[in-house]
C-alpha cells in the first residue's frame, strides 16, 4: 500500500467518524511499512500517530512515537533536512501539549536551526514556526517574547493572499499577549484589527468571540467600564449563539455582572 492509499483510507475513517479505528489502522500500516523497509512511509505514519494521539490527549503514546520518529530520522540520516525540521515541529508541539515546556523549547530551537539557510524567510513554514513558538512562550509566561514571535509570523503570513482567517487569528493571539504583557494600548489596536477582519470576512466562532472578550478585558483594565460591558455582551452573545451555555459563556456572564455592579456604584 502506498502513502496516498494509506492517507486516503485514513481520511475516510475520519470522514465517517470511525475514530476508534484510527489507531489500529495506522499501527497496522506502520507494521507493513516497516516490513517492507519503507522508511519514508514509516516517517509519515509516525507523524500522523503523533498528531492523532496529541489530539486525543494520549500524550504518553504521542511522546513514544516522537521518540520513535527521531530514532528513525537518525537512521535515515535526514536530521539536517527541512522535512525533519517539520517533524521536529510536530514533536515540539506535542511536548508543549503534554506540559513539557522546556523540552518543547529545545525542539523549537532545533527547528529554527534547520530552517535557517534552507527555508525562505517568507515561507509559510516560517510563519508556522513563529506562531507555534509564540504559543509556547505564552505558556511559559514570557509574553514579550510571544509578542515578538507573533509579530514575525504576521509579517510573513500577510504576504500570502489566501490567509485571511490565519491573519485574523494571529491578530487575536498577538492582542492577547500584549494584554498579558500589560501593553494595553497596543493590545487594543491589534484586537480591534482582529475584530474588523472577522467582521469583514463574515466569520464568527471561537476566535472572534475571544477577540471580543479580550477587547472587553482591555477596556476594563483601562477603566472604561461602558466599553468593557459592550464587548463582554457581544462576546457572550457570540459564544451562546454557537456553543450554548458552556463554561466560557458562564465566565463571560460573570464578568458582565462584575462590570454592571461597578457601573452602579
Image: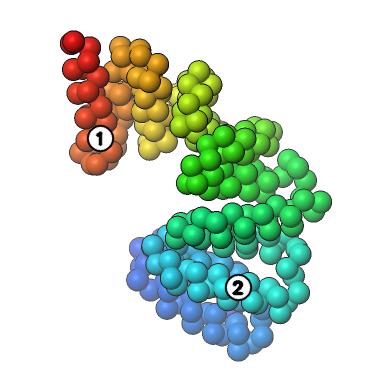
Question: Outermost residue toward the right?
Answer: 117
In the displayed structure, does residue 177 sit left or right of residue 129? left
Q: Which residue is mark 1?
A: 251
Q: Position of residue 147 (x, y in %)?
A: 57, 34
Q: Nearer the viewer, residue 107 or 237?
A: 107
Residue at the spot x=38%, y=74% of the render? 21
At horizontal 25% and vertical 19% (from top left) the residue drawn is 259
Q: Is residue 215 left or right of residue 80?
A: left
Residue occupying image coordinates x 48% and y 21%: 184
Q: Which mark is residue 69?
A: 2
Colour scheme shown = rainbow
Please, what secondary structure does the residue beneath circle 1 have? helix
Residue 236 visible in the current orientation: yes
Mark toward the viewer: 1 or 2:
1
Q: Are marks 1 and 2 in contact (CB under 8 Å)?
A: no
| Quadrant the N terminus occupies | bottom right
Q: Residue 229 occupies which quadrant of the picture? A: top left
**Left or right: where 176 falls relative to 209:** right
| Element carrying mark 2 | helix
Left or right for 235, reference 155:
left
- For the C terminus, the quadrant is top left
Q: Residue furthest bottom?
A: 35
Examine the rendered structure and indicate whether residue 75 appears above or below residue 152. below
Q: Nearer the viewer, residue 4 or 47?
A: 47
Q: Residues within 10 Å of mark 1 (few under 14, many from 20)?
A: few
Residue 195 image point, x, y percent: 45, 24
**Does 219 appear above or below 27?**
above
- Residue at 53% x, 21% y is 186
Quadrant of residue 7 in the image? bottom right
Image position, residue 162 (x, y; %): 61, 37
Amino acid at each position: 500500500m502506498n502513502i496516498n492509499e494509506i492517507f486516503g483510507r485514513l481520511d475516510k475513517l475520519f470522514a465517517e467518524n470511525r475514530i476508534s479505528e484510527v489507531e489500529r489502522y495506522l499501527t497496522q500500516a506502520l507494521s507493513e511499512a516497516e516490513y517492507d523497509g519503507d522508511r519514508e512511509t514509516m516517517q509519515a505514519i509516525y507523524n500522523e500517530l503523533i498528531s492523532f494521539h496529541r489530539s486525543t490527549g494520549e500524550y504518553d503514546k504521542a511522546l513514544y512515537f516522537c521518540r520513535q520518529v527521531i530514532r528513525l530520522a537518525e537512521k535515515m540520516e535526514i536530521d539536517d533536512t527541512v522535512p525533519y525540521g517539520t517533524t521536529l515541529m510536530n514533536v515540539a508541539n506535542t511536548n508543549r501539549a503534554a506540559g513539557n515546556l522546556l523540552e518543547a523549547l529545545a525542539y523549537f530551537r532545533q527547528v529554527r536551526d534547520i530552517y535557517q539557510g534552507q527555508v525562505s524567510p517568507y515561507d509559510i513554514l516560517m510563519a508556522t514556526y513563529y506562531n507555534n513558538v509564540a504559543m509556547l512562550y505564552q505558556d511559559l509566561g514570557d509574553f514579550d517574547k510571544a509578542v515578538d514571535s507573533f509579530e514575525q509570523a504576521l509579517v510573513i503570513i500577510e504576504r500570502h493572499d489566501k490567509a485571511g482567517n490565519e491573519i485574523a487569528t494571529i491578530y487575536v493571539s498577538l492582542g492577547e499577549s500584549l494584554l498579558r504583557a500589560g501593553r494595553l494600548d497596543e493590545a487594543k489596536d491589534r484586537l480591534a484589527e482582529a475584530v474588523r477582519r472577522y467582521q469583514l470576512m463574515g466569520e464568527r466562532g471561537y476566535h472572534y468571540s475571544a477577540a471580543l472578550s479580550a477587547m472587553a478585558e482591555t477596556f476594563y483594565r483601562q477603566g472604561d467600564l461602558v466599553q468593557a460591558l459592550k464587548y463582554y455582551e457581544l462576546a457572550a452573545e457570540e459564544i451562546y449563539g454557537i456553543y450554548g451555555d458552556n463554561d466560557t459563556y458562564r465566565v463571560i456572564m460573570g464578568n458582565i455582572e462584575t462590570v454592571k455592579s461597578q457601573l452602579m456604584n
